[in-house]
Amino acid sequence: MRVFDSPHQLKEAVNKAKKRQNECSVGFVPTMGALHQGHIELIRKAREQNDIVVVSIFVNPTQFLKNEDLEKYPNKMEADKKICEVSGVDFLFCPTAKEMYEKDEIRIHAPNIRGYILEGTSRPGHFNGVLSVVMKLFHIVTPVNAYFGKKDAQQLFLISLMVKQMFMDVNIIAVETKRDSDGLALSSRNSYLDQFERKQALKVSESLRKASNLVASGTLYVSEIHKEMLLILEPLEIAYIAFVDREFHALEKIELKNSIILVEVLVGTTRLLDNIWL
Ligand code: PAF
């Protein structure tokens, strides 16, 4: 595995590798580090489906709001490098903010409606930062396939929309959410939770399981499912419980194979997201 911090050097190395292996495909897994089984699954898929695998680790400052503590984001660089090495990553890209951004920058703006609901309401401007950095990373890495977790469903949708609307040649591959054996969706932020908070956090996946069971037994009206989910989630600080179709338009009634139920809660000071695709 070769490690790069310079965007230009990585680009050159990818281009050389592409030239060496005719028609080779590049699979890309963008991350902010603190890698867990969820990321490992993305890398595994990328390894399985591509000739060259590139992973980036970059805690992107432009997707953090002013009041959010970017400095406290977990940093496990040495462990992350080992994980990438044993997972068969070819190129690991770990740039600094200085290498990625200039002072006066062109920025991508998330769409006015679907970029500013749900996570975009809780964190206004967050998706502008995500889309801007993903656009840059795609131009540096030039992947054929890029892998994102379904857990960040709105991010996944907006990146797919950007690729479509900007006529970019990247396939966005959605990968299932990985969970601990107790149901908690894996997230780098779980490391912030103490024992009590972790127990509370389980209510999120419990509420989604309840919703899924209700739908399976024929309850499709959002108002009824919402009521039942609230009973489970009530002790927590709920940012939102939302019911959308796969294009992130609000739903009144679940459309089978075209719906996502999303939850965001605050447990202590930790923001937790989870969802279920129905
Ligand atoms: O999901 C993440 O880890 C980040 O938002 C991403 C896609 C790597 C962009 O910084």
Image: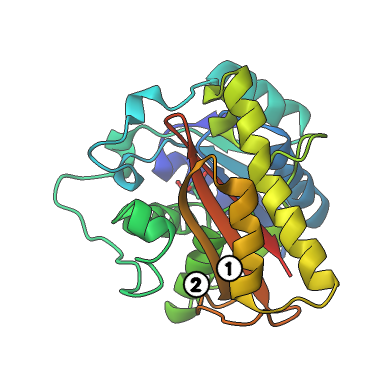
Q: Secondary structure at mark 2?
A: helix
Q: Is residue 47 above or below residue 4?
A: below
Q: In this view, which residue lies farthest toward the right? A: 217
Residue 29 rendering spot, x and y as whole percentages: 61, 47
Q: Residue drawn 41% across and 72% down? A: 114
Residue type at mark 1: give it.
Answer: Val
> In this figure, which residue is indicated by the disc labeled 2?
163
Q: Nearer the viewer, residue 223 or 259?
A: 223
Q: Is residue 157 left or right of residue 256?
A: left
Picture quadrant of residue 162: bottom left
Residue type at mark 2: give it.
Answer: Val
Q: Is residue 13 left or right of residue 237?
A: right
> In this figure, which residue is indicated by the disc labeled 1?
170
Residue 50 rendering spot, x and y as whole percentages: 75, 55
Is any part of residue 166 visible from this angle? yes
Q: Nearer the viewer, residue 153 or 268?
A: 268
Picture quadrant of residue 174: bottom right
Circle count: 2
Are discs 2 and 1 less than 8 Å apart at CB? yes
Q: Secondary structure at mark 1?
A: loop
Is any part of residue 1 visible from this angle? no
Q: Nearer the viewer, residue 237 or 91?
A: 237
Q: Give the distance between the C-alpha atoms of the residues marked 2 and 1, in whole angstroms.
A: 7 Å
Picture quadrant of residue 186: top right
Q: Residue drawn 34% across and 66% down? A: 116
Circle 2 Cα neighbour tier, 10 Å, few/some/many (<14 / 14–19 / ≥20): some
- Which quarter shows the N terminus? top right
